[in-house]
């Protein structure tokens, strides 16, 4: 059975003040074509469909429009979507009853019943199972443990890891009871793994390396593990069958040199996954970091050109003060950030100072709260508890906001 693995779309995301919606629309058009051309039978989307718990109408329209189109592909038998830490489970789950008629299965959050996370894919002719997907959403700490007063950070970390792996083991055991013959068992997840390679665009909901799962801990019965949460495509622990697909676009300038892709694989038996193929996603608006003196930057802007659909998004770095008024216009690029850097940083091509274009209205509540905690003298264990409480309050706020909007629009 042929699968396509993608994740971390973050519909509605912005880079500084720049909306990325037009690029995402082109990505979804491209993805639709890949689903057709590759003969994909099951599409896996491993969390963070939206960038916000309260997505905009434009982001929602893009999401549902794509699902409606993709569901019309004759050979695409199922689309399976799991919730990420940025997603509101209630937003994802609300239309689940309707989406099932479009061949879409949504698991916005864990329910406590493992059977709710198992999706059986049946053969059209025989009606017998030909693959089982363990659609595991983002597991919040409240899903895995209860806080204990005075608990050490080490003990908390180990409990999170153990309970996460126990969650997967329970699903594998249940799937094995359902299996008819030697069929593939595919896992999904939205989590951090140990020793993974991060970029600046991931916003950590956990303190430090808390709860980072070792690749060796996942049950060996999985034919393939389709992971989300980390935006750089990569194998986990060097294992070919445990992968992050990464995000479809570069969401920060730390990802300038990171190739983006989706992953296609053919799962034949419980132990055989063949033709694992990485398909590069097109670049619609390149991200560029350019360092130089004011004169060098002026010359570069004047001479830069490209053939991409949208202007390049540019971060300028200079040891001197660079005013936008002194920079020439160029329709092929848009300057979204200007940084003042030290001589040493310029020599090393590294940026150390704060982005002057990163205004407060472009920051998320989670990011601002995390920055406040980072600059505080609060002990790490207490920071973790405060983060849990803040995330819970924020989730309730968004869900209350959505309920109020629905009542107003009724």
Image: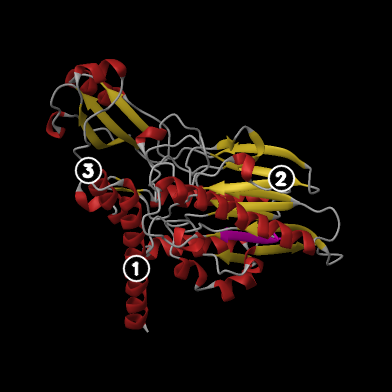
**Region rendered in magenta:** 74-81
Circle 1 Cα neighbour tier, 10 Å, few/some/many (<14 / 14–19 / ≥20): some
- Relative to the observer, which residue lies in front, 25 or 342? 342
Q: Is residue 363 visible?
A: no
Q: Position of residue 50 (x, y in %)?
A: 43, 57
Res 1 label: none
Q: Earlier in the sequence, mark 3 or mark 2?
A: 2
Residue 14 drawn above or below residue 116: above
The one of 384 and 333 positioned closer to us in this rendering = 384
Badge 2 local density, few (<14 within 10 Å), some, or many (20+)? few
* Alpha carbon separation for disc pair 3 and 2: 41 Å
First in residue order: circle 3 vs circle 1: 3
11 relative position to 76: left or right? left
Relative to the observer, which residue lies in front, 339 or 367? Answer: 367
Quarter of the image where one finds residue 53: bottom left
Residue receiving disc 2? 220
The stretch drawn in magenta includes residue 76? yes
Q: Nearer the viewer, residue 136 or 404?
A: 136
Locate residue 364, reporting x and y percent. 29, 53
The answer to whether residue 366 is left or right of residue 179 is left
The residue identified by callout 3 is: 375
Can residue 259 be seen by looking at this rendering?
yes
Between marks 3 and 1 in the image, the one whose residue lies nearer the viewer: 3
Tag 3 and tag 2, C-beta contact below 8 Å = no
Please name the residue that numbered disc 1 is placed on: 398
Q: CA distance from mark 3 to mark 1?
A: 26 Å
Label 1 and label 2: CA atoms lie apart by 38 Å
Judge depth for marks 1 and 2 and give the one in front: 2
**Contact (Cβ within 8 Å) of mark 3 with mark 1:** no
**x then y, percent, for residue 59:** 41, 60
Question: From the viewer's perspective, is 175 left or right of 26?
Answer: right
Q: Secondary structure at mark 1?
A: helix
């Amino acid at each position: 059975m042929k699968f396509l693995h993608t994740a971390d779309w973050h519909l509605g995301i912005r880079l500084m003040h720049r909306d990325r919606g037009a690029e995402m629309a082109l990505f979804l058009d491209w993805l639709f074509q890949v689903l057709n051309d590759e003969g994909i039978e099951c599409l896996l989307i491993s969390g963070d469909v939206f960038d916000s718990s309260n997505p905009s109408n434009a982001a929602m329209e893009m999401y549902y429009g794509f699902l409606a189109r993709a569901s019309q592909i004759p050979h695409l038998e199922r689309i399976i979507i799991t919730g990420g830490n940025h997603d509101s489970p209630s937003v994802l789950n609300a239309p689940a009853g309707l989406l099932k008629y479009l061949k879409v299965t949504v698991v916005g959050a864990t329910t406590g019943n493992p059977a709710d996370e198992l999706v059986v894919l049946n053969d059209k002719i025989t009606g017998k199972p030909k693959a089982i997907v363990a659609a595991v959403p983002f597991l919040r700490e409240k899903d895995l443990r209860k806080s204990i007063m005075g608990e050490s950070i080490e003990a908390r970390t180990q409990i999170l890891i153990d309970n996460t792996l126990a969650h997967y083991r329970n699903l594998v055991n249940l799937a094995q009871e359902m299996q008819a013959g030697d069929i593939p068992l595919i896992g999904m997840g939205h989590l951090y793994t140990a020793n993974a390679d991060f970029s600046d665009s991931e916003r950590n909901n956990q303190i430090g390396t808390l709860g980072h799962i070792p690749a060796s801990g996942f049950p060996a019965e999985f034919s393939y593990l389709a992971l989300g949460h980390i935006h750089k495509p990569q194998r986990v622990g060097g294992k070919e069958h445990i992968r992050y697909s990464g995000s479809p676009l570069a969401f920060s300038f730390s990802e300038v040199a990171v190739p983006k892709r989706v992953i296609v694989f053919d799962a034949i038996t419980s132990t055989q996954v063949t033709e694992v193929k990485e398909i590069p996603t097109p670049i619609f608006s390149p991200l560029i970091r350019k360092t130089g003196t004011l004169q060098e930057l002026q010359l570069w802007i004047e001479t830069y050109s490209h053939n991409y659909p949208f202007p390049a998004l540019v971060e300028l770095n200079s040891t001197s003060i660079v005013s936008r008024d002194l920079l020439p216009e160029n329709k092929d690029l848009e300057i979204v950030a200007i940084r003042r850097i030290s001589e040493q940083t310029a020599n090393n091509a590294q940026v150390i100072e704060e982005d002057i274009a990163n205004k407060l209205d472009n920051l998320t509540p989670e990011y601002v709260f995390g920055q406040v905690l980072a600059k505080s003298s609060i002990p790490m264990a207490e920071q973790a508890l405060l983060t849990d409480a803040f995330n819970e309050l924020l989730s309730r706020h968004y869900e209350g906001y959505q309920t109020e909007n629905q009542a107003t629009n009724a």
